[in-house]
Amino acid sequence: MNYIGKPLARREDVRFLTGRGNFVDDVKLANTAWIAFLRSPHAHARIRGIDSTAAAGMPGVLRVLTAADWKAAGLGELTCVHPMPFSDGRPMNEVLRPCFAADRVNHVGDVVAAVVAEDRYGALDALDAIEVDYEVLPAVSITARALDAGVPVVHERFQSNLVNEVVRGNKAAADAAFAAAAHVTELTVSSNRLAGNALEPRAYLADYNRATGQSTLWATTQMPHLLRRWICRYTLFMPENKLRVIAPDVGGGFGVKGHYAVEVATVVWAAKLLGRPVKWTCTRSELMMSDAQARDHYTRAKMAFSKTGEILAMQVETLASFGAYCSNFGPSIPGNSYPQTITGLYLTPHLHLRVRGVYTHTVPIDAYRGSGRPEATLVNERLMENGAREMGIDVVEIRRRNLIPHERFPYKTPVGRIYDSANPPLMLEKLVALSNYARLRTEQARRRKAGELVGIGLAAFLDKSGTGPSATLATKGGLHGGYESAIVRAHSDGKVTVFSGSHSHGQGHDTAFCQVAADRLGLPLEDISLVQGDTDSVPFGNGTWGSRSLSVGGIAIYKAADRVIDKAKIIAAHMLECAAPDLEYAQGQFTVAGTNRGVTFCQVAEAAHHGANCPTGPDFEPGLEATVFYDPPDTNDPSAMHLTLVSIDPTTWRVQVEAYYTLDDCGLVVNPLIVEGQVHGGLAQGIGQAMMEKVSYDADSGQLLTGTFMDYAMPRAADMPPLESDFICTLAPSNPLGVKGGSETGTIGPPAAIGNAIVDALWHLGVRHVDPPYTPHAVWKAVAGK
Amino acid sequence: MHSFEYRNPQTLAEAQALLRDTHGAKLLAGGMSLVPVMRLRLVEVPALIDLNRIAALSGITVSEGVVRIGAMTRHAAVAASAEVKAAIPALAMLAGGIGDPLVRNRGTIAGSLANNDPAACYPSALLGLESTVVTQQRRIPGDDFITGMFQTALAADEIITAVEFNAPRRAAYVKFANYSSRFSIVGVFVSRYASGVRVAVTGAGAHAFRVADLEKALSGNFSAAAIAGIAIDPANLMSDLHASAEYRAHLISGLAQRAVAQCA
Amino acid sequence: MSARVLHPVEMTVNGVTIRAQVETRQALAEFLRANAGLTGTHIGCDTSQCGACTVHVDGVGLKSCTLFAVQANGAAVTTIEGVAPQGAMHPMQQAFQEHHALQCGFCTPGMIMSALDLVRRNPEPTDDEIRQALEGNICRCTGYYNIVKAIAAGARAMRAPAGK
């Protein structure tokens, strides 16, 4: 192997560094019109009427569109690709996001109308001229209150805000374990609502060619094929072969650019109506009220322990916000990801979990890096450490007593999910060594004596990635596949193009995927290039989400590359007049074993394209490429542990994260530079959730209070703590490379680890819990007992 | 935002005439406050008068204990000025903490003071130091300049030309910033003159204000201990998404003590 | 609702003179992207915080979203495209690549321009000074660790005598 495992600098960087990236807003087409969206300023209101006459008459305005136009055109809806029924079998109380709100608006930002005009200024000016007669109604925005008696109901036909109820585990067994427990720890925990906030706002450019009937869409999407399918099948009712979706350079996604967003189908439709290109770029303040948001759980949970701190049972009762509508993957987060990881890396004999999805008059909730695991880990790990403190057991020691031993994997959890491989005890010991835990405790004792507030906290957790296979996904409610596509195509000169149905928006696939291809093909990396993000040239792929690119997309490439070499061997054998098994292949060279007769890969490729010096017969075809649709046999389970040291300013109550340690297991690492970068980036988002980020709505009116970066805090360089990282590797049993996902663990640990450290620091002041974000104000309130 | 008329006068007299004669015109200094609210379509501005070409409005001079900063002097220049660092280091430090380096390359002292954002830093220096706002018409004592939330004593056609600060014996500025906007949740400016003590607070109310109780205690005994026990009344302080009035009251006390300690 | 107000503007961008009639409300960032055809300068927010739009105007780093194009009349503007001659990357750009200081690339032009402005003010920044200097540049992908390393390395490379 030449390339796998090497920390190669990325080839794709040059265009980004020199300002020659090709993001959707960079794409220019002649005669492009601009679309702008009018959004509700109210969280809940009846639309009594919309008067767009003035707007329609303004200079440069081409069309004004509302729900009435949408309906008259017979158009459909968005889709929820992961519905989650009640555990008793009833379908969930599903209401999809409307492309245009018809008689009600249900969150600030709900789309009410759209203007298409000759340019952006014209469209924006016309928006101001649209008169909407709203009858403002009472709103509910706080998740914890959504099922209280008397609160406003978002969708009246259900007569409550309950979306669904998912129950896992065994209540009777859990209750019995609690009754017999030596110690029970209880907590009420909230996971704060977040906005993904990739730096590139969403943008769509659609064109329609009247002569060919062909639509083309440039979109900031992580899933071009799925987006095409959703638009065609559920919304605009057009044939898939009439829509080409191109995802060029995309500036960060984190799951949010994988959702089926409210605006995109409208942009495609508008282009069709006008027969010319139509463009839209979201502003940041629009994004804050339109991009689906994340997390927002309210949980009451308890953990039962034996006298010596072994977990006997866990009981979890969660309200999970859905926002005002069901969004794409949203239901799978509290419905699948959360229950599957709530017991983390611990031997947990009994579990009873009830998650109820609830509607509120807020922006819909959907997947965002971590998706359910940060929520689960916060609950699990806060119970663990509070339990340890209450029982007087060291927080590292209590982990030792509960971690699933290496030999117990594959391990079946109380919800029936099987974790594939991990070595939690080894990970813990390495983390203890990396952080020099004993020295940290000694230091802490010394500083406490001097009057400082210092805390140490851990988080140990399981991630889950590479979701598949498709059949299993379906049993869990998924309406989309878990496979990934790849073509490995050798050209007539022996150079290679790899086509991947996955999509890179920062993950470095152009380098990492080609490292895999180069090693399997035995060719130099510079001879291989990657094509992605174009439904015209790439076979159907399920795109990038859930840390699946390498373990699914990368393995599809692996297998396709192997098939190319298999075929090349047959051609080479023919050229060398020997039997294929007599050939050895290395570094682009086929050699007859024991001789120095051979041909190069390039020569084979040339022969394959010429078609003449190839085997004859009905079973052989010219050309040298392979297409693979790879459905992984199983999900894979990365794991990680974090440890942190914090100090707290006794005047301002600002938390300083003084040191942060991470230990990751993501199986085999193809490019250490890239994987480490993923850990860093995830960590910034995890620290963001822990320290400062929160989407806030007014409790009474439902007004969005964090509408821009002035109020939604984004971590900056100076907010990142000193970091030390290490890795172990337990190979994923389900793929030939043994790779696991490596990109989400950073988001999972910090709210739990830092929360634990803060409680450690303030335990003697009577503080038992603080909810994230751990702002100075929040810590002050906790200490003051408010 | 809607279109606007744009003028960029080369002299102060030209600017004044334009301001007087153009209905609804606003002065454009650094633009770090005005342009974002225009782009968010929160204000309609029919005409902008750009002051950035008027060279006479920039510059720093220090003479006989008075630091005079031209209206259009950038925060970065104040922060880097050897003369300001020597005469009133707390002022240089304050300027060096406004926004971020790119904002500081452009933002101006007059723009900040004329806008008078409740959480801006410069208003606390205006009250925290003996100061004068100089316009083309008159000299306004710093203590009289701030009249309300985003309100100042400036007349409609009045243009700040410079701001003067008397150098104190000692001064310090302690800023506790908001994670998101990086403006002050609370900022406290403390100075000590032969003639008395000033304690000014920004970020905590409708506008910057002086705290008489703290000034009185410090005049008798300039030490953190002298004010440690003085409770600040949260009644007139701001509560918002980021901090309650009670927390702000708590911060004012704590940060004032820190500022006093830094003055030692 | 006012009619469109157009204003003549002339500036040099990366050494090339550009003349246009622009709407007064057009930001410099939009002008660069639309009129000058330079899409390397990005727009990431609307409150002048993210820094993706950072360019140099008359040698000084500025957020081009917070400047109207008409204000840059007569100015010399440098964008990311003008940082290095064709075919060769500037030492700061090279340092970013070596240290994996970018992932999606959207914040990168602004980071580089801001880093260059930092080095102009402070040729030997410490890691802490670099972190503080990046207050106005948000990255959502990298977690900043590699960006800080890269800027330190880039600054060192810029100090090294030519030909190293």
Image: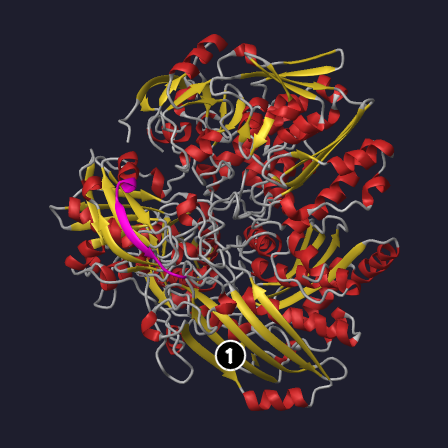
Residue drawn where x is 71% and y is 29% of the image: B128
In the picture of the structure, the residue carrying the numbered disc 1 is A354
Q: The C terminus of chain B lies in which quarter of the figure?
A: top right
Q: The N terminus of chain B lies in which quarter of the figure?
A: top left
User: Residue B125 or A196: which is nearer the viewer?
Assistant: B125
Magenta-colored stretch includes residue A197: no
Amino acid type at image mark 1: Arg
Up-down relation of residue A511 to residue B153 (above or below): below
Asked which secondary structure carries label 1, the reply is strand
Badge 1: residue crowd in 10 Å (few <14, some 14–19, many ≥20): many
From this viewpoint, is residue C122 visible?
A: no
**Residue C7 at x, y percent in the picture:** 33, 19
The residue at the far left in this view is A211
**Residue A55 at x, y percent in the picture:** 22, 40
**Residue A224 at x, y percent in the picture:** 33, 55
In the picture, measured across the screen, residue A268 lies left or right of residue A409, that is left
Up-down relation of residue C64 to residue A507 (above or below): above
Q: How is the image coloured?
A: secondary structure
In the picture, measured across the screen, residue C157 lies left or right of residue B130, that is left
Q: Chain of mark 1?
A: A
Question: Which quadrant of the figure has residue C125?
Answer: top right
Range shown magenta:
A127-138
Residue drawn where x is 67% and y is 50% of the image: B247
In the picture, measured across the screen, residue B179 lies left or right of residue A452, that is left
User: Residue B96 or A223: which is nearer the viewer?
Assistant: B96
From this viewpoint, is residue B256 visible?
A: yes
User: Residue C95 or A247: which is nearer the viewer?
Assistant: A247
User: Residue A483 or A747: which is nearer the viewer?
Assistant: A747
Residue drawn where x is 80% and y is 58% of the image: A440
**Residue C43 at x, y percent in the picture:** 43, 37
Question: Which quadrant of the figure has residue B210?
Answer: top right
